[in-house]
Image (cartoon, helix red, strand yellow):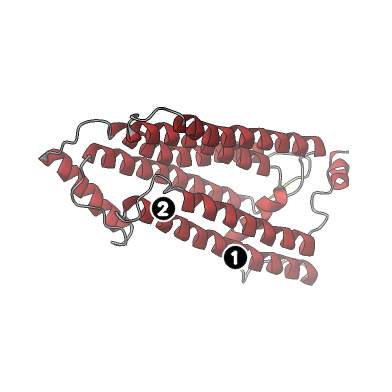
Amino acid sequence: MQRVAAGNDAFGYDRHARNQALRMANGVAVIILGFSLGSFLALLPERSNTDLQEVVHGLDRLIGLMTKDLVELPAVQHHPETFIVEVLGVLVGYVILKHMRQDADDYRSAFRRIEPFYTAGQRRRSKLAWAAFDIIGIAMAVLVPFLMSLLPAGVPDALVAGVNRLALAGGVWCIVYGTMLGMRTDLFRYNFHALRQENVYELGLRESDSLRETRLGEKRLCDLSDSITHVGIMIGVIGALALYFLPTMRTAYFWVPIVVTVVVTMLLQWAVMSYAKRTYEPDFDADGAVAGALA
C-alpha cells in the first residue's frame, strides 16, 4: 500500500485534486452549456431536412445503445439543430466526467492512503475559497433569472431560457469547482473513498487485528456511500430526462431533480463519512498530528 508521508505532498496529490476539480466543473458545465446553446438555436426558424433527420436518427440509435433502449427520443424534431447540440453537449460532458472518474480511480489505486500534510491555515484558506466560489455561483444562478424575469413581455422564451441556462452553467461551474477545491484538503475523505479500490478479502491482511477491523468497518461504510451515489445519480438523471423529453411534463426547470438529488446525496454521504470518522479515526487530521509531522 502506497502512502504519502505526513507533511509532504511527494506524489502530487494537490495538483491531482485541483485537476479533478477543474475536470468535474468543466464536464458538468459543458452539459448545461449544450442546453443553453440549444435554446439559442431554437430562435432560428423551424426547419428540417433529410440530412439533419439522419443525424437525429443516428444520435437516437447511439443513445439507445448507451442506455440499453431505456431512453427513446422523439423521431421528429422541430429544431433538429437544437436537439443535436444538446445531445452533443451531454456526450462531451459525459466523456469528460468519465475520464475524470477513471483518472481518480487510477490515482486511488496507486495511492490507497494519504497521511495528513495540510496545515490548519491551508485548510482554513481552502474553506474560504470554497465559500467564495459558492457565493459567486449561487449569485449567478439566481440573479440572472431574476433579472430576466423583469424583461418586458414579448422577449422570446428561447432567448430567456438560453440566458438562464448560460448563467446556470457558470454558477454550477463555480459551485462544483469551489466545492471540490475546498474538499481536497479533507484527506480522510480521500482515504475513505479510496477504499473502493480495496479488495475486502485482502484488506488489512498484513496489519493488526484492531486495524483490520477498523479498515473493514470503513470499507463497509464506503460501499454504503457508493451505493447512495449510484442511486442518487439514477434518480436525478431519470427525473431530468422525464421533465425535459416527456411532452406532458416538459419544463424549463428540468435540472431541478439533478440539483435536489445531488444535494441530498452529498448530505447523506457526509453523514456516512462523518460517522465513519467519528467511529474509526476521530483524530486523523488533528492539528497536533500535522504539526508533529512537520517538526
Give percent across and percent down for residue 165: 43, 36
Is the C terminus in the top left, top right, bottom left or bottom right quadrant?
top right
Q: Earlier in the sequence, mark 2 or mark 1?
A: 1
Side (left or right) of 203 relative to 121:
left
**What kind of element bears circle 2?**
helix
Q: Amino acid at mark 1?
A: Asp
Per the rendering, the mark at residue 240 is 2
Q: Is residue 104 visible?
A: yes
Indicate the secondary structure of the residue bearing disc 1.
helix
Task: Answer with left or right where residue 145 lies relative to residue 241.
Answer: right
Q: Is residue 184 above or below residue 211?
A: above
User: Which tag is nearer the camera, tag 2 or tag 1?
Assistant: 2
The residue carrying mark 1 is 223
Q: Callout 2: few (<14), some (14-19), or many (20+) C-alpha neighbours within 10 Å?
A: many
Q: Is residue 295 above or below residue 76?
A: above
Q: CA distance from mark 2 to mark 1?
A: 26 Å
- Image quarter in which the N terminus is found: bottom right
